[in-house]
Image: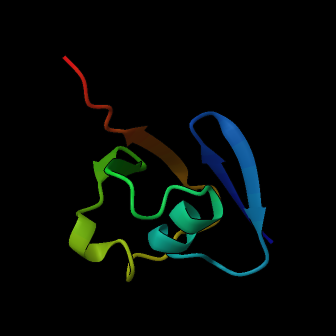
Amino acid sequence: MIALTVNGEAHSFEQPPSCQQLLERLNLAGKRVALERNGEIVPRSRLGEQLLADGDRIEIVVAVGGG
């Protein structure tokens, strides 16, 4: 079991997910987001290949338009 902390909340997976799979599970796929893994930004081009590991701390920020 893989345990992650996402924006301060615990999440668990049976297999290590990619960052993209995490976004899909959180219904954030296709939205403008920034994802930080253990203090480092994961580039959008690497979201599909970057696998998460047990104990990772993830912060996700969703861009909001307006003015």
Q: Residue furthest front?
A: 66
Which of the 4 image quarters holds residue 61?
Answer: top left
Left of 35 or right of it: where is 21? right
Tally the numbered discs.
Answer: 0
Q: In the rendered view, tell whether residue 5 sits above or below residue 21.
A: above
Q: Quadrant of the N terminus?
A: bottom right
Rendering colour mode: rainbow
**In the displayed structure, would residue 37 be above or below residue 61?**
below
Q: Residue at x 39, y 76 (%)?
A: 50
Please provide percent x and percent y for residue 21. Answer: 55, 73
Residue 48 image position (x, y, % from top left):
39, 79
Q: In the picture, residue 8 is in which quadrant?
A: top right
Quarter holding the C terminus? top left
Residue sitting at 29 percent across and 60 percent down?
42
48 shown above or below 43: below
Is 50 placed above or below 59 here? below
Residue 39 relative to residue 11: left or right: left
Q: Please give the name of the residue rendered at 64% of the width and 64% of the height, measured from the top-left corner.
A: 25
- The spot of residue 3 in percent (x, y) is 73, 59
> What residue occupies the far left of the structure in this picture?
67
On screen, residue 6 versus residue 30, left or right, reads: right
Where residue 13 sits: x, y (%)?
75, 70
Residue 40 is left or right of residue 14, and the answer is left
Viewer-proximal residue among 19 and 23? 23
- Residue occupying the point 39% across, 40% down: 62
Task: Decide which of 37, 44 is in the foreground and name it.
Answer: 44
